[in-house]
Amino acid sequence: YMVTNLGISIALAICVIALMMASLFKSSRMVAIALVPNLFPLLFTAGVMGWFGIAIKPSTVLVFSIAFGISVDDTIHFLAKYRQELNMKSWNIREAVLLALKETGVSMMYTSIVLFFGFMMFAISNFEGTRFLGVLVSITLAVAMSTNLLLLPSLLLEFEKALTTRSFSEPFFSLLDEEEDIELEELEIQQGLSPGKGDEQHEALKRQREQNT
C-alpha cells in the first residue's frame, strides 16, 4: 500500500514539475533532459535502502519528495542562467554552458552543503525513522548536487542541437533588469533625487543614461 502511494505521489510530482518547467522553458525535450539528473538520485537512494534493508515507512517515504523538490530547484536555477547566457553570447552553446556553470555552480554547492549537514543533524536522533530520514535525504542531496553539476551540463553539450531551440531562449515572462535598475538608482542619487519615484522620472533617466552611453 505504501509503495503504491509512493509511486503515485512521485509520478504526480514529476508530472506537475514537468508541466511547470515546460511552461517556463517552452521546450519538452529540455524538460525531459532536465528530469534525468533529478530522477537518478532517487533511484540511487532506493538502491541504498534496498541494499541496507531499510524499509519504506511513513518517515522514510518522505525522503523522495523532499529531495526531489530541492534538487529540481538547482536544475531550474542552472537552466535559467544558461538561457540568459545563451542570449548574451549569441547562441554559443558551449560558452553559455561553461558560464552558467561558473555562475551557478558555487551557489549550488554551498546550498547543497548547508542542506546536507542540516539534514544530517537528524542522524543523532534517538528515533530511528528520523535518523533514517536525515541520512537518506543528505545522501540524496549530495548525489543530486553531483548530477546537476556534472550530468546536466554534459547532457546539454551532448544533445545541444536537439535541445537548445529558439523557443527555449525566450522566457515565458520578462523579469526586471536588476542591473539596469541599480544603475538608474545610482544616477538618481547622484542628481539628488529620491530613487524609484514615478514612472516618468524613471523613463527620463533611462533615456539620459542611453544618451550618455
Image (cartoon, rainbow, N blue to C red):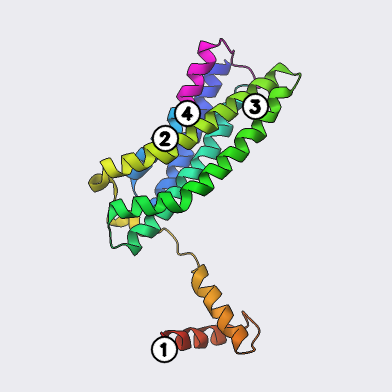
How many numbered callouts? 4
Q: Which residue is mark 1?
A: 211
Name which residue lies at 55% across and 27% down: 139
- Three-letter amino acid code of the residue under disc 3: Gly
- Indicate whether 102 appears above or below 201: above
* Alpha carbons under labels 1 and 3: distance apart: 57 Å
Place residue 92 in its image quadrant.
bottom left
Tell me the SS state at disc 4.
Answer: helix
- Three-letter amino acid code of the residue under disc 2: Pro
Q: Is residue 45 magenta?
A: yes
- Three-letter amino acid code of the residue under disc 1: Gln
- Three-letter amino acid code of the residue under disc 4: Pro
* Alpha carbons under labels 4 and 3: distance apart: 15 Å
Name which residue lies at 52% across and 34% down: 68
Q: Residues within 10 Å of mark 4 (few under 14, many from 20)?
A: many
- Indicate whether 207 appears above or below 126: below
* Alpha carbons under labels 4 and 2: distance apart: 7 Å
Name which residue lies at 52% across and 68% down: 178
Q: Which residue is mark 2?
A: 37
Dot label at residue 134:
3
